[in-house]
Amino acid sequence: MIAPVKQALAEIFALGGPVVMILVALSVLVLTVVLYKLWQFTAAGVGRHAALRDAVAAWDAGDRAGARAALDRSRSYLRPVIDMALSGQRDAARLQAEAETRFARLESGFRVLDTVAQMAPLLGLFGTVLGMISAFQALQDAGASVDPSILAGGIWVALLTTAVGLAVAMPSALVLSWFEARMDADRLLAERALRTVLAPGQGPGAARGAPAAEPVHA
């Protein structure tokens, strides 16, 4: 098992040099981070807040018992924050800080993906420049008997590092954008939920001062 891996790594090193080896290591790092974040998002219930929304809506409508029952069904990582608000915590800054603490825990690793997405193309370009230098040095050493295959082969190997760099960078950037979009949606949901719990009954109808329905007389 180990021998084939060593042979494959040796072939990669011989083909693209140390830059490609670094890019391969970065791709393994990215895959590890992505799998961990997917597991973490699934365990935390990112994006799955139906029961939490029901609890906030019930609280906003004045149904305290219904809000508690809905909150008890929630498995969202934001449940403790909403529970604090329903239990009488009125310090908005404290509640926001509690929510941001949970967001920060889920956003750990984003910087790694962002760094790889930015550095991988630069590493690929660096490998290409080194490969071009080697190709032209070989062309110079050939003197008058220039073989076009020497230059073509050197350029092909040099451009390989750029292709590998882009192959690592593009998926990293796409996955990072998806993760960030999920967290932005949850952050917006948390802000709206906290505002609703701290100021219930302030919906559009209440803001316009909609009159209450008149009683029906027999």
Image (cartoon, rainbow, N blue to C red):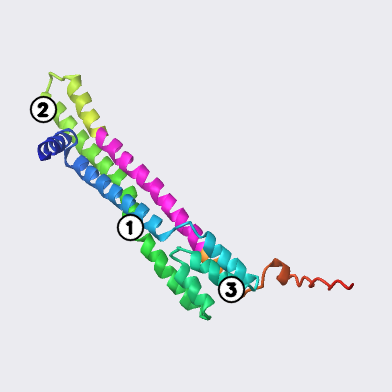
At 26% from the left and 33% from the top, the residue drawn is: 159
Disc with the residue nearer the chain's start (1 vs 3): 3
Pinpoint residue 103: horizontal percent, then vertical percent.
42, 64
- Look at label 1 and name its amino acid: Gly
Q: Residues within 10 Å of mark 2 (few under 14, many from 20)?
A: few
| First to last magenta residue range | 160-188
Residue 177 magenta-drawn? yes
**Which labelled disc corresponds to residue 56?**
none
Pinpoint residue 21: horizontal percent, then vertical percent.
19, 42
- Look at label 3 and name its amino acid: Ala
The kind of secondary structure element at disc 3 is helix
Q: Nearer the viewer, residue 59 or 165?
A: 59
**Which labelled disc corresponds to residue 65?**
3
Classify residue 130 by image quadrant: top left
Instruction: Please name the residue that numbered disc 1 is placed on.
Output: 109
**Position above or below: 184 against 133:** below
Q: Residues within 10 Å of mark 3 (few under 14, many from 20)?
A: few
Pinpoint residue 75: horizontal percent, then vertical percent.
45, 63
Pinpoint residue 118: horizontal percent, then vertical percent.
33, 49
Using the numbered discs, state the Cα–Cα distance from disc 1 to disc 3 in whole angstroms. 39 Å
C-beta proximity under 8 Å, tags 2 and 3: no
Mark nearer the viewer, 2 or 3? 3
**Position above or below: 18 against 81:** above
Mark nearer the viewer, 2 or 1? 1
Q: Nearer the viewer, residue 164 or 101?
A: 101
Instruction: Please name the residue that numbered disc 2 is placed on.
Output: 141
